[in-house]
Amino acid sequence: MLLASVIDLTEYRLPDVVVLPSLAIGVVVIASISIFDNSADRMRYAYLAALLAFGVLLIVHLISPQGMGFGDVKFVALLGLMVGWQAHSFGDAVIIVLWLFLIGFAFGTVGGVALMVLRGRSQAFPFGPFLAIGALVTVLLSRALVG
């Protein structure tokens, strides 16, 4: 997550060579933990959150490919997997993904304004790092956010 964010900040892209193996490792780790911890429900909610997050940004990407890169779409699947592991029900998974987006977009708005001031108005915007911050905050506050 950190490596992908740094690359996105410097190169304005989230490379498959970083994101896809991370996603695959996340899927395997969550499945392994679920087997040994007897937490199959949490695994399902994590996978659901990953698919939900992916699906939402995929729609945004299809509507506006220049506005949302496909790297962000793949990256948010990884982030959805991470935040979804905090869910204890289907409703929790949906709420956690909504918080991921809300917090990520809030940080993205502030960060975008700051980058425009520092770098000048640019067409490229590295959204991945702000989504990652949103995921981190969501995980840290998940109990309070879900209720």
Image: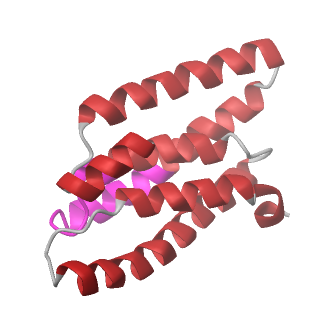
Residue 44 location, quadrant: top right
Q: Quadrant of residue 91?
A: bottom right
Q: Residue furthest front?
A: 118
Q: Is residue 48 magenta?
A: no
Q: For this view, does 66 lie left or right of residue 137?
A: left
* Residue at position x 26%, y 60% in the image: 61
Quarter of the figure that contains the N terminus: top left
Q: Give the image location of residue 27, x and y in percent.
A: 53, 25
Residue at image location 23% in from the left, 55% down from the top? 10
Q: Which residue is painted at 68% across and 30% down in the image?
A: 43
The image position of residue 83, as x and y in percent, is 63, 48
Quadrant occupied by the C terminus: bottom right
Where does the magenta region start and end?
53-72
103 lies above or below 73: below
Tell me: residue 16, above or below residue 56: above
Expressed as whole percent of the image width and height from the top left, the position of residue 73 reads 34, 51
Residue 62 colored in magenta in the image: yes
Q: Is residue 104 left or right of residue 18?
A: right
Where is residue 75? Give x, y as percent: 38, 46
Direction from residue 143 to residue 92 in the image, left or right: left
**Displayed quadrant of residue 74:** top left
Q: Main secondary structure of the magenta part?
A: helix
The structure's colour scheme is: secondary structure
In this rendering, the answer to whether 48 lies above or below 138 is above
Along the viewing direction, whichever of 133 and 21 lies nearer the viewer: 133
